[in-house]
Image (spheres, coloured by chain):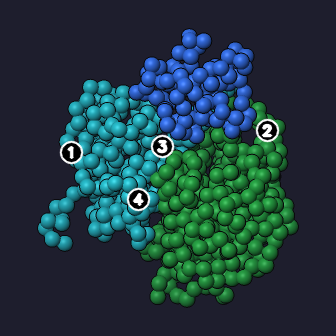
Amino acid sequence: MATVIQCIADNVVSPVGRTSVENYTNVKAGCSGLARYEEMDRVSSPFMLSRIDRHLMDELCTGLGIPDGKYTFFEKMLLTSSIQAVRKSGIDPSSDRVLFIISTTKGNVSLLDRDVKGFPQERVLLGRSAGMVTGYFGNPNAPIVVCNACISGVCAQIEAMRALQSGRYDYAVVIGADEQSPFIISGFLSFKALTDTPCRPFDKDRTGLNLGECAATVVLKAYDGPACGWVLEGGAIRNDANHISGPSRTGEGSYLALMEVLRKCGGTQGLAFINVHGTATAYNDEMESIALYRAGLIDVPVTGLKGYYGHTMGAAGIMESILSMYAVQDGTVLATRGYSTQGVTYPVNVSPDNRPAYGNRFIKLLSGFGGCNAALSYAYYNI
Amino acid sequence: MEEMILKLKQEIIEVLNLEDVKPEDIDNDAPLFGEGLGLDSIDALELIVLMEKNYGIKLQDPAKGKEIFKSIKVMADYIQKNRTR
Amino acid sequence: MTDMEKDRNLKYTVITGNTVTVCGRVLEHEHTGSVMLTEIYRTHAGDWPKFFKMDTLSKVGYLASELLLKELGGCRLEAEEYTSARAIVLFGTTASLCADRNYQETIQDSDNYYPSPALFVYTLPNIVTGEIAIRNHYRGETSFYVLDGFDAGSMAFHLQRAFCDEQTESVLAGWVDSTGNDDFSCFFTLLYREDVQDLERLETELKGIMDNLNDIELWKR
C-alpha cells in the first residue's frame, strides 16, 4: 500500500482566534481581524492590518508556559501555534523521527531596525530563529525553513509530504508565521499594492490587498494503510518565468500547478471548492480567474479568506488549508468576505455568503513574488 | 529646461540602474515604457519615489504615473509645473 | 553501478568575493566584489541588462547558473520553448539579508524616508530562482530553503525529494549566501535523477564542493 500522509492535528493563532475551532467558528460568523491604521512607526500612510494584540499574545505565552524575554514576537507566533498543535497530536516532538519545517517570508526582519533592541542580530537568520523552536521542543534534527515568498505555506506542506514519504521521518510539524513589521508594510506601500479599506477579492471595485498576522501549524503523519481522516494527496509548484513581481497575464504557473495537482489527485472528483489566493489586487485576481478557466475549473466553487485575515504571507498556505478542512467537514463553502460584484474576465464561482459544500476534497492555490505558484489537494475520509 | 532634462536623465539612469545607458542615448520624446528604454512596472514605482525624493511631488495614484512618464519631455514639463523643491 | 558511473562527479561553478571557477577552471578577472560580478557578466554572460537591477544574491546566483549552463552546453532551451522539466532549488543561510539591510536603509531614518520598491522586491531569496527561471524559460518548480549553516546532508536529502515531482527531470541546485554587496559565495550544480539515487554519495559530493569553495576563499585571503 502507498504511504498515506495524514494531518493529525492543527492550530491557528490569529486576531480571530487562538485555536482552529475558534478561528473557523468566527470566520463562519463573518468576523474579520482587519482594522484601519492611520500610521505605524515611520509608516505615515494609512493601511488595513489584521494584527495580533501583543498583550493577548503574552497572555497566551504565559498560559502555554513559554518563558518571558527569551523569544522574539515572531518566535512566539511559531511557538504558541506549534505547542498547541503538538499537544493535540500526542507525538513526542523530541524524537529524531520528527521533522520541523517552518514557513516564513521575513521572520525576525524587524530586528534590522536600529531602534529595535533586546535580541542578538543573528536571530535575523531564519535558520537560527527556527532553531529556537526545535530547541524549545528538544528536537535533534536541523529544522528547514521554506522561504519561497507567499507560497511558502503550501510548499512547506508539500516538502513535509515528500520528507515523510522517504521513510526517514514519521511526523512533520509544519509551522507558518509572519510578523507584519514596518519593513513589510512600507514595502507593500511602496508597491502601491495596499488599500486602506477592507479588501475586495474578485470584485470589480477591488483596489488592493490588506496585510495580516497569523501563525498556523499542521502535524502530518506518515503511515501505510487505508486513507483515513484528512489526507494530503499531493501538490505542485510551478514558475511563470515571466516577471519577478507581476503575475503572468495568462496565469501560466498557477495553471500548470493546478493541472499537475488534478492529474495526480484524481481530477475534480469530490472537489468541494478551491481556496484561492484572492489578494484583491487588480492583477492577481484576474490572473487566477484565467488560470482556473484554463484548467477547466471555472465552475468549481471558489472561496478566499483574505477578507477576514488579510494576506498572512508565510502562514497563508497553512492557515487557509486548515480553515478549508474545517469548512469541508462542516459542509460549507465559506463566504468570500469583501466580494460583491464580479470583476474578472472569467467569472469565478465566488459568493459573499456561506454556501453548502458538496464533496470531500479541496484544492489550495497560492502565488508569490518571484513568479512562483503552488497548489495542493487534501481529501477527507471518514474514520 | 535643457539643464533640468539632462539632470533628470542622469537621475533616472542612476536610480533605475541603467548601466549601459548614457544621457545622450535617451531621446527626449521617445516612450520610456514598452519600447524605448523598456522600463517595467517596478521602474515606474521607482520613478514615483524619485519624483517625491528629488522634487517633492507626491503621486498617490500609480495610474497617473503612466501619463506623466510617457517621455522625458512630458515628465520634465510635469516636474517643472509641480515641483516643490 | 559501473566503474564509469562511480567516477562521475558533479560539474559545478563557484563564485566567491574574489574567485570564479567553472567546472574546475578559474576565470581570469581584475576586480573583486561587486565590480568583479559586473566584469564577469560583461566578459562571460552578457546580453541581459536586467542584471544591473538585481541585488547581490540574484547577481551571484544568476551568474553562477549562466556560467554553468553555458559550460554544460545544450541545457538552455532553444527558441522560445518553455519547460516544466527543470526545477531550480536553492539553499542558503543568509537568505536575503544583504537586500534586507539595503532596503532597511531606505526606511530607517524618518527624515530621509523613501522606501524603495526596486530594493524591496529583492528582500525574498526566492527571487534568485525567479530571475533564473525568466532567463531560461523554466516553468518547473522553484524553491528556496534556509538552513542554519551549510548542511550537506539536509541539502542532499531535500534535493533528492525535489524529484518526487514526476515532471522534474533535472534540478539546477545551488548554495548561495551574501552578507554584503562585496561579500558573497555560492556554488551551483545540475542534477539529474541518477545523481540523487545514492544519498550518501550526493552528500559527500556536495560537501566536497563546499570544501573546495572554502579552500579557495582561504587561499585567496
Q: CA distance from mark 1 to mark 3?
A: 25 Å
Question: For the residues tagged 2 and 1, is the chain the same?
Answer: no
Extreme-left residue of the structure: C3
Residue name at image x 56 percent, y 10 percent = B3
The residue nearer to you, when weighing C13 against B17, is B17
Q: CA distance from mark 2 to mark 3?
A: 32 Å
Residue A39 at x, y = what percent? 79, 36
Q: Classify C49 as above or below A70.
A: above
Question: For the residues tagged 2 and 3, is the chain the same?
Answer: no
Labelled disc at residue C24:
1
Residue name at image x 86 percent, y 67 percent = A29
> Which residue lies under the disc numbered 4?
C82
| Quadrant in which residue C7 is drawn | bottom left
Does residue C203 appear anywhere in the picture? yes
Q: Amino acid at mark 2?
A: Pro
- For the residues labelled 4 and 1, say whether their Cβ atoms are less than 8 Å apart: no
Q: How many residues crowd around disc 2 within 10 Å: few (fewer than 14), some, or many (20 or more)?
A: some
Q: How many residues crowd around disc 1 within 10 Å: few (fewer than 14), some, or many (20 or more)?
A: few
Q: Amino acid at mark 3?
A: Thr
Q: Amino acid at mark 4?
A: Tyr
Residue A283 at x, y = what percent? 64, 52
- Chain letter, blue in picture: B
**Chain identifier of the residue bearing label 3 in the image:** C
Q: Earlier in the sequence, mark 3 or mark 4?
A: 4
Question: For the residues tagged 4 and 2, is the chain the same?
Answer: no
**Chain identifier of the residue bearing label 2 in the image:** A
Residue C9 at x, y = what percent? 21, 57
Colour chain A appears in: green
Element type where label 4 sits in the image: loop
Q: How many residues crowd around disc 3 within 10 Å: few (fewer than 14), some, or many (20 or more)?
A: many
Task: Pick the quarter of the image with the C terminus of chain A.
Answer: bottom right
